Each structure stands twice: as C-alpha cells, then as structure tokens.
Image: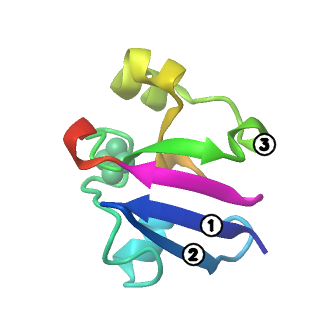
Amino acid sequence: MPRITFHKNGQVFEDEVKSGANLVVRAGIKQYPYPHLVYECGMGKCAKCACKVLSGGELLPPPNWKEKKQLGARLDEGFRLACQLWLEHDLELEQIPESI
Ligand code: FES
C-alpha cells in the first residue's frame, strides 16, 4: 500500500492508502488527509488541490491536460493536482497555502 506523507503549515501527516487511491476522493469521505487537504472541484478545474511533490514524483504518470492547463509553469516547480493523481507508490507532498 502506498505510504503518503503530507506536509501542511509546518506539520507532517502520514498514513497508508489503498493502491489506486485519490487523496481528494478520500478527503471527501473524511479519510486521511482530511481535514488538512484543501480542494474544491475534484475535477482538475480549480487548482485548489495543488501540492508540491517532495519525493516519489518520478513514479507518477506525466501530468494530464488538466494539470498542464491549471498549473502551467508550476509543473516545473514540482506541483501536481492531487485530484488528478491515483496513487500507486509512496509519495511525499506539501500543500503550500500561499501557492493556492
Ligand atoms: S480540486 Fe479542483 S483542481 Fe483539484
């Protein structure tokens, strides 16, 4: 099972999720990383779920067109949209409030 480490406001949260899990879907049913993950649409349209990947990003699939459209140059800084990621591997990510 993927182990997900989530940084927010200087705090670190960590838990395992099922293979193929989506963090926004999980937060929507009040599972980790609820209540720490900020999100809105769940559909790649608002970018509120943007997170900077700190490690494990090399195992993620390439950004899809929604991520390219919403994140633009921030993709190069390591940002991804949590709602567009179905997790198969360990991942460490940070949601930076001022970047939303
Ligand atoms: S929740 Fe809106 S883009 Fe991810």
Using the numbered discs, state the Cα–Cα distance from disc 2 to disc 1 in whole angstroms: 6 Å
Magenta stretch holds residue 90: yes
* Magenta portion: prevailing SS class: strand
Please tell me whether mark 3 sits on a helix, a strand or a loop. Answer: helix
Of residues 93 and 67, the one nearer the viewer is 93
Give whichever of 2, 46 is nearer the camera. Answer: 2
Mark 2 or mark 1, which has the lower sequence index?
1
Q: CA distance from mark 1 to mark 3?
A: 13 Å
Q: Looking at the image, do the residues carrying marks 2 and 1 touch, with CB atoms under 8 Å apart?
A: yes
The amino acid type, in three-letter code, at marker 3 is Leu
Residue 26 coordinates in the image, percent (x, y): 47, 75
What stretch of residues is rendered in magenta?
88-95
Reading the chain from its start, which is encountered first: label 3 or label 2? 2
Work out whether 57 lies above or below 75. Answer: below
Instruction: Read off the residue under disc 1.
Output: 4
Residue 1 among magenta residues: no
Q: Residue pushed farthest front?
A: 10
Residue 79: x and y in percent read 47, 34
Residue 14, numbered circle: 2
| Residue displayed at 35% across by 50% down | 49
Say above or below: 20 vs 15.
above
The kind of residue on which mark 2 rests is Glu
Say the numbered circle drawn on residue 99: none
Instruction: Identify the image quadrant of the C terminus.
Output: top left
Tell me the kind of residue under disc 1: Ile
Numbered tag placed on residue 59 in the rendering: 3
Q: What percent of the width, then of the height, locates residue 48?
A: 27, 47
Q: Compute the Cα span from label 3 to label 2.
A: 19 Å
Q: Is residue 27 visible?
A: yes
Left or right: residue 87 compared with residue 44: right
